[in-house]
Image (spheres, rainbow, N blue to C red):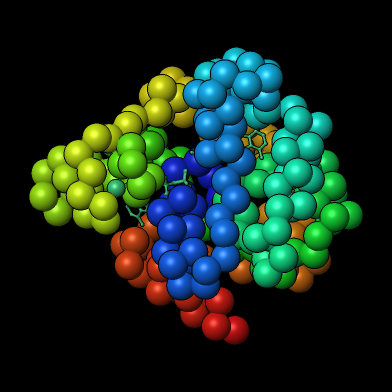
């Protein structure tokens, strides 16, 4: 499980872990955004919470994860990114599947705002970029799939980021000690380069 504030680099590192381990990535944020785009019932419920930067209610998220864990590809283990985000979500997960490791990526709030406001992704493959910290090698061409269309999230604005950070500090950060108490937590410094953070994570995965 990758744990940390919005913009810490979870999605960026998840892409690398998936390549290295073959375990499917489960990002509740990506699942919710897909539901909003497809106009499903779930999307209709989640939209307002996501736009304001608040958390989607626990029962909705827990239902989504219960369904995801039943898929055949979950048998060999999953990589969670952005889930759980509250203690009730972690308690629900504990009842349905064991967690082997929680990697907490630490980044200060001021860097978070900078990271999120410059974030964009490839519309075809989802590769994560940043205007300054992770530009495309050839301008406007995706390094991994050669796609030329990119997306920016509506909630990646400074005003919404502040709300997302308060939701993180109030509702999500208590999970760090919750997992520490269970002996599952590993902490890493997310202020280093993408490469260095990736290296630290792969050292942990080799443990
Ligand atoms: P999260 O999934 O935790 O919200 P992302 O992986 O989407 O975070 O990263 C947020 C932004 O910060 C992206 O634009 C990404 O390119 C950039 N980023 C990720 N890791 C680093 C890093 N170690 N140094 C600088 N920028 C980074
Ligand atoms: P980031 O890590 O950049 O904040 P995500 O893509 O993980 O963004 O999440 C986007 C939004 O989706 C959150 O602001 C929240 O509204 C909702 N969300 C995602 N995962 C959860 C979750 N596990 N519990 C509650 N809300 C969630
Ligand atoms: Zn791409």
Q: Residue furthest right?
A: 95
* Residue ID at (75%, 44%): 67
- Residue 141: in sight, yes or no? yes
- Seen from the viewer's position, the closer of residues 66 and 4 is 66
Q: Residue at x 11, y 44 (%)?
A: 139
Identify the residue at the far bottom of this view.
Answer: 207
**Which residue is located at x 82 percent, y 41 percent?**
88
The location of residue 52, given as percent across then percent down, is 55, 18
Image quadrant in which you'd find residue 198: bottom left
| The C terminus - image quarter | bottom right
Q: Is residue 111 visible?
A: no
Above or below, 63 relative to 206: above
146 or 55: which is nearer to us? 146
How many marks the image carries: the answer is 0
Q: Is residue 175 left or right of residue 39?
A: right
172 left or right, relative to 123: right
**Who's the residue at 68% across and 42% down the image?**
85
Residue 19 vertical position relative to residue 122 in the rendered view, above or below: below
Furthest toward the left, the residue is: 138
Quarter of the picture holding the N terminus: bottom right
**Front residue of this view, candidates 166 and 143:** 143
Q: Is residue 154 left or right of residue 40?
A: left
Q: Position of residue 97 (x, y in %)?
A: 81, 60
93 to 99, vertically: above or below: above
**Picture coordinates of residue 111 (x, y %)?**
37, 43
Q: Residue 158 location, x and y as percent? A: 39, 25
């Amino acid at each position: 499980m990758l744990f940390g504030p919005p913009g810490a680099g979870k999605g960026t590192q998840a892409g690398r872990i998936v390549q290295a381990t073959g375990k499917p990535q489960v990002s509740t944020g990506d699942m919710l955004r897909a539901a909003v785009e497809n106009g499903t019932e779930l999307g209709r419920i989640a939209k307002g919470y996501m736009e304001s930067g608040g958390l989607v209610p626990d029962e909705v998220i827990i239902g989504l994860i219960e369904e995801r864990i039943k898929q055949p590809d979950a048998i060999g283990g999953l990589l969670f990114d952005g889930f759980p985000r509250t203690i009730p979500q972690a308690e629900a997960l504990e009842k349905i599947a064991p967690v082997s490791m929680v990697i907490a990526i630490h980044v200060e709030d001021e860097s978070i705002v900078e990271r999120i406001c410059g974030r964009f992704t490839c519309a075809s493959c989802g590769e994560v970029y940043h205007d300054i910290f992770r530009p495309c090698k050839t301008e406007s061409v995706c390094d991994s799939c050669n796609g030329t269309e990119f997306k920016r999230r509506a909630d990646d604005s400074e005003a919404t980021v502040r709300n997302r950070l308060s939701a993180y500090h109030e509702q999500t950060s208590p999970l760090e000690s919750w997992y520490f108490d269970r002996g599952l937590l590993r902490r890493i410094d997310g202020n280093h380069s993408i490469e260095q953070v990736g290296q630290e994570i792969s050292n942990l995965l080799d443990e």
